[in-house]
Image (cartoon, rainbow, N blue to C red):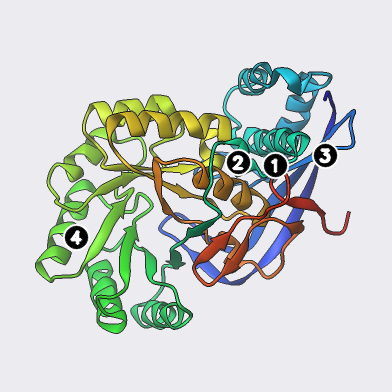
Amino acid sequence: MKIRRITTKPISIPLKQVFRTALRTVNTLENVLVRVETDTEFTGFGSAAPTAVITGETAGSIAHAVAHIGAALEGMDLAGHELVFQRLNSCMVANNSAKAAVDMALYDLLAKSMGIPLYRLLGGNIQSLKTDITISLDSIDAMVEASSARVAEGFTILKIKVGNNPELDIERLEQIYRAVGSEVSMRIDANQGWQPKEAVYVGREIARRGIPVELMEQPVAAHRYRDLAYVRKRLMLPVYGDESVFSGTEALELIRIGAVDGINIKLMKCGGIYNARKIAAIAEAAGIPCMIGSMMECHLSVTAAAHLAAATSAISIMDLDAPLFCSTNPVAGGISYHGEEIVLPDEPGLGISGLKGS
């Protein structure tokens, strides 16, 4: 099965509500869909999310990068797919979201050619996952209302966005806890929004107040590894790295200096499933858990992340809710949501039968 052509299609999906973090505000989801055609009846699908403030990529840069990747992979035979993935990762520096879109399309093709779902190709046997639901950064009242509404919908794990204002963040968390009660798990994500001492203060204060937070994600600037270690060594609360970890190299260094209790793997950061599996293996060898997350991604790429999670024992925390914020789904097939449960498809590959409107 040889690669014949790789093409892209930009899409724009209005969100059901504004999504805010300490880094950005999003009203519309912009993604780039990727189609990999072969000399067989099989076509592979992938997608990329431009997130300039994290990966440095835009929709335009992704489209150009995929064109470059397509030229590098054209004519290669997926019978020797290890060489294909090596070429994909070495044909250009960075551009990880573009690589991720092509990567998942290649895995889609491999599984389709064998007639099995991707999670089974990857060694998995779990067909359903449980995701958290994100509470966007907003006023206290708005966040309490959103949290209560999500709990009423059946979600039992809230991922609460915080950052930039420690005192206000503490009040946000206390009021949300009072509203939803102790039966609901709470995770907090500062998206690099605090200074090290602020993060330690927040962690200690919420512990003093008895607010049961499960973990703190990326409290400080991504490149400040020592600051992350400073926070982690002063809190009982588990500290996870997200924007600090793009590859196995960063994972190894953060583990070496004792900076993290866990790692959030995202396909857009690391360049796809091929590299994500390496990060998960490093974390597993070090005895630390992984979370699987996403940028503001559509149904297609989150489906790929779900297949990976279902086949990877090191991944124990699911943050795969981005499609729930989208007003439309650009693909046919893939994962389905039943409240907080994600069900993987039985169909071969990703379970994506095609792109709508194409």
Counting residues from the start of the chain, the first of labels 3 and 4 encountered is 3
| Residue 342 position by quadrant | bottom right
Q: Of the residues tagged 1 and 4, which is closer to the observer?
A: 1
| Residue 44 position by quadrant | top right
Residue highlighted by disc 4: 202
Counting residues from the start of the chain, the first of labels 2 and 4 encountered is 2
* CA separation in Å, label 1 and label 4: 47 Å
Q: Are marks 1 and 4 in contact (CB under 8 Å)?
A: no
Q: Is residue 335 left or right of residue 309?
A: right
Label 2 packing within 10 angstroms: few (<14), some (14-19), many (20+): some
* CA separation in Å, label 2 and label 3: 19 Å
Q: Of the residues tagged 1 and 3, which is closer to the observer?
A: 1
Q: Of the residues tagged 2 and 4, which is closer to the observer?
A: 2
Counting residues from the start of the chain, the first of labels 1 and 3 encountered is 3
Q: Are marks 2 and 3 in contact (CB under 8 Å)?
A: no
Where disc 3 sits, the SS reads strand
| Residue 335 position by quadrant | bottom right
Residue highlighted by disc 3: 43
* CA separation in Å, label 1 and label 3: 15 Å
The residue that appears at 61% across and 32% down in the rendered structure is: 95
Q: Is residue 275 left or right of residue 60?
A: left
Residue highlighted by disc 2: 120
Q: Are marks 2 and 1 in contact (CB under 8 Å)?
A: yes
* CA separation in Å, label 2 and label 1: 7 Å
Residue highlighted by disc 1: 116
Residue type, mark 3 in image: Thr
Q: Is residue 341 above or below residue 39?
A: below
Residue type, mark 4 in image: Val
